[in-house]
C-alpha cells in the first residue's frame, strides 16, 4: 500500500501484538503506544482487549488518561472488548471510569466467567458474509444512542458498532484469520485522513505516474 497509514496500538497490557499483526496484514503500519507523545503521529488507534480495570490503573500511572481522552474524542479509534469498555459512556457491573465517548451502556463480563468464553459465527453487515467472533469474558452492549450504527449482533445485542470515527467490538477480531474488521477500521482511518486534509494526501499518490 502506498503512503501506509500509521496506526497506534495501546501496548500497556493485553493482546496488542495480535492487533499489530492484523494491521500489518491489511497494509497499515502499526505503532505501539506506551506514552502520551507516541500518540502524536498515530492517524488512528486501537485499544485492545485485556482487563479494563488494569488498563485504567496503567493509564493513570503512565499519565496517558488525559491524552487518550483528547485523542479518542477527535481521532479514529477502535476498541475491542476491554477497549470497548474503555470507550463507552456508561459502564456497569460495576460502574467504573472510562474515556466516555461511545454513546453506549456496556455491562462487563455479561456472558459469565472465563470458562464461558466462546467462538461464534455471526451475521454482520460488513461485506463478505458471516464472521467468526471470539468472545473472552466479553462485555455486552446493553444500550446505544441514536448515532451508533450496529454492524453485528449476538442474541439481539450489538457486538460491533460504529459511531462516526469510533469503532467498537465486544469480541476479538485480531484472534481470527479473517481480517475484515481491521480492514474496515483502516478504511475509516483513510477516510478520516482524506476528509481532514482535503484531497491533498490522496492527490499526491494519484499524481504520481
Ligand atoms: N472482562 C474484561 C473487562 O471487564 C474484558 C475482557 C477482554 O478484554 N477480553 O475488562
Image (cartoon, grey):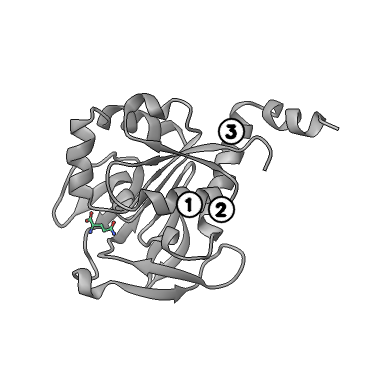
- For the residues labelled 3 and 2, the Cα–Cα distance comes to 20 Å
**From the viewer's perspective, is 102 left or right of 207?**
left
Classify residue 25 as left or right of residue 50. right
Q: In the rendered structure, are the residues bearing label 1 and label 2 in contact, judged by CB atoms less than 8 Å apart?
A: yes
Which image quadrant: the N terminus? top right
Which quadrant of the frame does ligand 1 lie within?
bottom left
Label 3 environment density (alpha carbons within 10 Å; few <14, some 14–19, many ≥20) = many
What residue is shown with label 3? 193
- For discs 3 and 2, the disc positioned in front in the rendered view: 2
25, 144: nearer the viewer: 25
3 vs 1, front mark: 1
Task: Decide if residue 146 is in sight here.
Answer: no
Is there CB contact under 8 Å for labels 3 and 1?
no
Position in image of residue 188 (x %, y %): 56, 44
Q: Is mark 2 within 8 Å of ligand 1?
A: no
- Residue at image point 51% right, 57% down: 181
Q: Position of residue 113 (x, y in %)?
A: 18, 69
Q: Which residue was labeled with disc 1?
A: 21
How many angstroms separate mark 1 from mark 2 (CA)? 6 Å
Q: Position of residue 183 (x, y in %)?
A: 57, 53
Q: Residue furthest left?
A: 94
Q: How many marks?
A: 3
Residue 95 vs residue 176, the one in the foreground:
176
Q: Is residue 96 visible?
A: yes
Residue placed at 29% from the left, 39% from the top? 99
The residue beneath circle 2 is 25
Residue 144 percent coordinates (x, y)? 36, 54
Considering the numbered disc 3 on the image, is that residue within a helix, a strand or a loop? Answer: helix
Badge 3 or badge 2: first in the primary sequence = 2
Secondary structure of the residue carrying tag 2 is helix
Q: For mark 1, give the secondary structure.
A: helix
Q: Quadrant of residue 111?
A: bottom left
Amino acid at each position: 500500500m502506498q503512503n501506509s497509514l500509521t496506526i497506534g496500538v495501546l501496548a500497556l497490557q493485553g493482546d496488542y501484538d495480535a492487533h499489530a499483526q492484523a494491521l500489518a496484514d491489511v497494509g497499515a503500519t502499526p505503532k505501539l503506544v506506551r506514552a502520551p507523545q507516541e500518540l502524536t503521529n498515530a492517524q488512528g488507534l486501537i485499544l485492545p482487549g485485556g482487563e479494563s480495570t488494569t488498563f485504567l490503573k496503567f493509564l493513570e500511572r503512565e499519565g496517558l488518561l488525559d491524552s487518550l481522552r483528547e485523542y479518542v474524542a477527535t481521532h479514529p479509534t477502535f476498541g475491542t472488548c476491554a477497549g470497548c469498555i474503555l470507550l463507552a459512556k456508561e459502564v456497569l457491573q460495576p460502574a467504573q471510569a472510562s474515556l466516555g465517548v461511545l454513546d453506549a451502556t456496556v455491562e462487563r463480563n455479561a456472558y459469565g466467567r472465563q470458562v464461558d468464553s466462546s467462538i461464534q459465527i455471526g451475521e454482520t453487515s460488513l461485506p463478505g458474509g458471516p464472521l467468526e467472533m471470539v468472545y473472552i469474558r466479553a462485555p455486552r452492549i446493553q444500550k446505544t444512542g441514536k448515532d451508533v450504527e450496529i454492524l453485528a449482533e449476538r442474541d439481539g445485542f450489538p457486538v460491533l458498532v460504529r459511531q462516526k470515527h469510533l469503532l467498537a467490538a465486544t469480541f476479538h477480531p485480531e484472534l481470527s484469520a479473517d481480517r475484515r474488521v481491521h480492514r474496515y477500521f483502516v478504511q475509516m482511518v483513510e477516510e478520516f485522513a482524506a476528509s481532514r486534509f482535503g484531497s491533498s494526501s490522496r492527490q499526491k499518490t494519484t499524481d504520481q505516474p
